[in-house]
């Protein structure tokens, strides 16, 4: 992602105030999508994410969360 390579599961993530304060949740989401595409033997797919926020923070964080997860309309994996 952006010229860097990442490995999932090396360190336990610390609890964050919001999911959008850094790229951690985004990178984990991309890794999950890539793993599922590989498992299904797909090289290309239109993906719809089913994600959520805590109900108590939904209104305040909804728009930022949508922008965060849709910042790249097309993603390529190696």
Image (cartoon, rainbow, N blue to C red):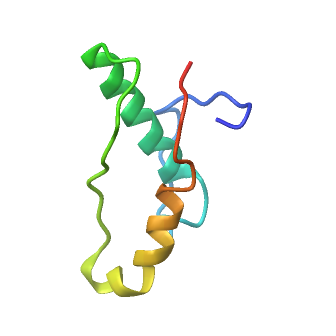
Picture residue at 56% right of the left edge, 18% below the top = 78
Q: Quadrant of the N terminus?
A: top right
Residue 2 in percent (x, y) is at 71, 37
On screen, residue 47 versus residue 5, left or right, reads: left
- The image shows residue 19, relative to residue 57, as above or below, that is above
Picture residue at 42% right of the left edge, 44% below the top = 29
Any part of residue 18 in sight: no
Q: Quadrant of residue 7?
A: top right
- The image shows residue 51, relative to residue 4, as above or below, that is below
Residue 34 in percent (x, y) is at 41, 28
On screen, residue 39 versus residue 72, left or right, reads: left
Picture residue at 47% right of the left edge, 63% below the top = 15
Residue 50 in percent (x, y) is at 26, 54
Front in this rendered view, residue 64 or 15:
64
- The image shows residue 47, relative to residue 22, as above or below, that is above
Q: Quadrant of residue 66?
A: bottom left
């Amino acid at each position: 992602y952006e010229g860097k390579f990442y490995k999932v599961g090396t360190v336990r993530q610390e609890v964050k105030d919001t999911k959008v304060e850094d790229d951690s949740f985004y990178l984990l989401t991309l890794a999950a999508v890539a793993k599922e595409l590989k498992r299904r033997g797909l090289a290309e797919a239109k993906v719809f994410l089913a994600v959520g926020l805590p109900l108590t923070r939904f209104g305040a964080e909804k728009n930022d969360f949508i922008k965060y997860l849709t910042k790249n309309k097309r993603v390529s994996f190696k």
